[in-house]
Image: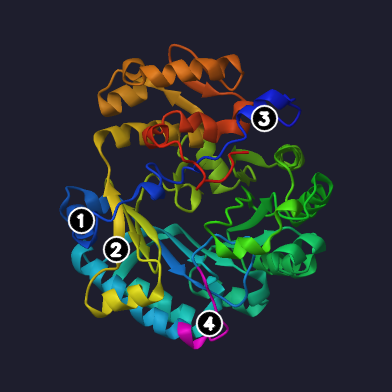
Amino acid sequence: MHSLVLNPELLQRYDVAGPRYTSYPTADRFVEAFGETDYLQALEQRRDGVGANAYPLSLYVHIPFCESLCYYCACNKIITKHHARGAEYLHYLEREVDLNVAHLGQGQMVSQLHLGGGSPTFLSDEELTQLMTMLRRNFQFAPGGEYSVEIDPRTVTRERLAHLAEQGFNRLSFGVQDFEPAVQKAVHRIQPAEQVFDLVAASRELGFESVNVDLIYGLPMQTPETFERTLKQVTQLRPDRIALYAYAHLPERFKPQRRIHTQDLPAAASKLVMLSSAMRVLMACGYVYVGMDHFALPTDALAVAKRQGRLHRNFQGYSTQPDCDLVALGVSSIGRVGPTFSQNVKTLDEYYDLLNQGRLPVVRGMALTRDDLVRRTVIMALMCQGRVLFESVELSHLVDFKQYFATEMDTLAAMQEQGLLTIDESGIQVTELGWFFVRGVAMVFDKYLQVDKNRARFSKII
């Protein structure tokens, strides 16, 4: 894959903005007409559904606090050094859990937990213990599940990692982004490589099953040469998983990004060189290209899921969990229960106010239509496996694929001529070249995007 030659005309054609498809429909399509009542109905339908309890839940908990601002960040976060705010937040998280469990049922089985942010390690050891105790009181945690937490290397020590292991976390995700000092200075996130190496070594000694490292390409002051140096350091670090994200510069939406000078950003062609270089370096070092933005060692559960066709995609990216319902807790968090999506309010004041009223803080969402479900199946198959089998979609949704997607098939024919995919009697297969543009392939099936051509709210697909 890394030896492919990409012609400039193709790059220019697909130098467009588009969704990352951690869901379909995408979160920007959620509506305020969907609210607490609709979400409660979804919880109760899961509780009362035949065999519903046989399917474990995923839990996502959003901890919004950070001690310092990273200029590239597009997450919902609150910058503060007042750690007392964590205790108040946990109090309200418990209220939210109680309201969920009242309608969902006590003791639901959980096979996946992810603490995200913000910086979950903003919380003290005692507060993390309080959070996990509260969750275990309300849910059953399945043996062998995936229990992960995002780590800001600047906020943890070996002792803190040991405490996380004691609390049952078995997977860590370190936010690295780039090891180059000039890039770190440009994005206001200084963390020496030695610090990360020491923490990853400690994680292995403590027995964590999987260590992930987040990288971002397209940051200010990055060049293909400096990013390759970072990649080589990462291969020496040898994490089990690597999440490689393209920086989405949307200063009109995310105020912190206004501190990044546009002239310091690498051009689209340079970003593509970085992506190609990452594939070359990481695959040469034994990593499996899982898809779009993830790499994993062959023995890691993510790579195994890819080989076995069990890969899934949710709001945290690629996942091994087969289409679990996701209960999302905390300010701004997004969940999925049955054929519905829901999102909590985005500010702490609103979050606290609604919970004080005894109401769940769901502010918007949507119930998926039959058409949404068909298209979701196709888009997720493309994003996760790079292949869509006509018969599988037809049997699952009772449609004639080529007839249902006649317009889309015409568009795909042009992509086939460009070498991005192949179409035969059995289905659609994304080529090695097409993986560079897989978001563009998936966009063909996005009904909402075809109707609304305003894509400025999305990042560039390459």
Helix, strand or loop at label 2? It is strand
Label 1–label 2 contact, CB within 8 A: yes
Question: Distance of mark 2 from mark 4, alpha carbons?
Answer: 29 Å
Give the mark nearest the N terminus, 4 or 3: 3
Say which amino acid is labelled 2.
Val
Is the residue under label 4 in contact with that under label 2 (CB below 8 Å)?
no
How many angstroms separate mark 4 from mark 3 (CA)? 48 Å
Q: Secondary structure at mark 1?
A: helix
Q: Earlier in the sequence, mark 1 or mark 3?
A: 3
Report whether 397 appears left or right of 28.
Answer: left
Dot label at residue 11: 3
Give the mark nearer the N terminus: 1 vs 2.
1
Residue 38: assigned label: 1
Q: Residues within 10 Å of mark 2 (few under 14, many from 20)?
A: many
Disc nearest the viewer among 2 and 4:
2
- In the image, 398: left or right of 310? left
Residue 156 belongs to magenta span = no
Question: Quarter of the image containing the C terminus?
Answer: top right
Which mark identifies residue 362?
2
The N terminus sits in image quarter: top right
Query: Could you tell whether 357 is left or right of 154 in the image?
Result: left
